[in-house]
Each structure stands twice: as C-alpha cells, then as structure tokens.
Amino acid sequence: MRRIISPINLREDRLPPGQHWTNKLHILGISDPPDIDLSEYRFRIFGEVENPITLTWDDIMELEKVELIADFHCVTRWSCPDVSWIGFHVDEIKKLVKIKETAKSVMVHSLDGYTTNVPIEYFFDEDVIFAYMLNGKPIPADNVYPLRLIVPKLYSWKSAKFVTAIEFKDKDEPGFWEKRGYHILGDPWKEQRYWED
Ligand SMILES: Nc1nc2c(c(=O)[nH]1)N[C@H]1C(S)=C(S)[C@@H](COP(=O)(O)O)O[C@H]1N2
Ligand SMILES: [Mo]
C-alpha cells in the first residue's frame, strides 16, 4: 500500500501557533454518528462535473488504498501527531468524473447535515484522502463512519466525517461552521480560526 506522509509533519514549525499536543482525537461533532447500513450507503459526486456519479460501498472498496500519516489540528487548540488513516486518494475522483474548468471549490456534504467548503487547490493536494480506517482499525463510528475527508493542511473542521456527497461549485461558499463564524479557509499556521482573525 502506498504511504503518504503529510508535508505538514516535516515542517520546522510543526506545531502551529496557539496549539498544544495531545495524544488522542477528541470526538467533536454536531450530532451522534449516524446509524447506516453499508449496503445502503451512497457517495455522490455532482455539481460542476460532466458526468455526475454515485458510488456504492463496494465501489469505494475497489479504489486503490493508501495510508496517510498526518498531524490533526483542531481549532479548539489541540493537535494530535501522526494520525494514521487508510482510504483512497482524491486523485481517484479525477478518474471517475470529468471536472469542469468552472469548478473552483468543493462543498462536502455529510449524513448529519454538516457541510464544509474546501477550495479546489486545497482539495486536490498530495495529502488529501477519503478515509475509512483510523489507526489500523476499521470504520470507528465516532471519528469516521463510514467515510471521512482528511485535509491535513487546514483546521480539522474541514475534515468532514460521515461524508455522503461532494459538490463541485463555481465559487467558494461557506459551509456549516463557516456560516457561523469560522474562517472561510482555516490555515492553522496563519491562525485563521474565526472571521475576525
Ligand atoms: N460530519 C461532521 N464532520 C465533522 C464535524 C461534524 O460536526 N460533523 N465536526 C468537525 C470538527 S469541528 C472537528 S474538530 C472534527 C473532529 O474530528 P474527531 O471527532 O475525529 O476528532 O470533525 C469535523 N468534522
Ligand atoms: Mo472543531
């Protein structure tokens, strides 16, 4: 299996300003993890693409597996080093759909109603994956179930859990927390925490 080490782990200023290390992922979310039968799970890719598609869980299992090792930085100031995720790299999506040139941002939709926006150049990055395993264990309900996006270079509210669709959009629009005061981008090294930052 291909292993990706996020470049953020190799930075000289590895711990972003205003953060402290902790040794676990603290479960944070707007609701409990959804109860879903994997045989009914669907992952939809739509918006600014030539050929929208819907994948089943079996389709997802067929995609090439990668392991990502990346630090995890929560805007509430804890950071967890070297988290191991297994899933598929975002480049797999480019093999499945033809993305239009008008696509500028990705809106991620989750089963709990959560959404978050990721500009396209942050989405298609070397260390961005959709994960279904955490630290070697299959599908832990609280942190992942059944699929989550991991965007190591941004605060972890961008790493949406329980993903059910991604929507390519012609402009970057705020998602759930971005509408409620979180920064539109969220770069931890720039401390882009809230609007006024
Ligand atoms: N679907 C969904 N994804 C979500 C959230 C959420 O409420 N719903 N919360 C976000 C926030 S604010 C954080 S800090 C991380 C927490 O991830 P963890 O519970 O695995 O530590 O998930 C992010 N992804
Ligand atoms: Mo968060």
Image (spheres, rainbow, N blue to C red):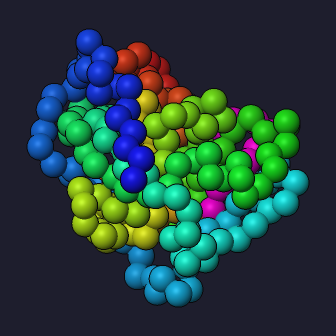
Residue 35 visible (yes or no) = yes
| Residue pictured at 32% horizontal, 38% vertical | 70
Q: Residue 172: give x, y in percent of width and height.
A: 69, 35
Please name the residue shown 81% across and 50% down the image. 98
Q: Is 26 left, or right, of 91 in this rendering? A: left
170 within the magenta span? yes
Segment tinted magenta in the rendering: 165-174
Q: Position of residue 178 (x, y in %)?
A: 53, 39
Q: Nearer the viewer, residue 30 or 180?
A: 30
Magenta stretch: residue 75 in it?
no
Which residue occupies the extreme left position in the image?
A: 23
Tell me: 52 left or right of 8. right
Q: Is residue 130 above or below residue 152?
A: below
The quarter of the displayed image where residue 136 is located: bottom left
Q: Residue furthest top?
A: 12
Taking 114 as reference, is 171 left or right?
A: right
Q: Residue at 31% across / 17% down in the picture?
A: 11
Counting from the top left corner in percent of width and height, residue 99 is at 80, 46
Q: Is residue 31 visible?
A: no
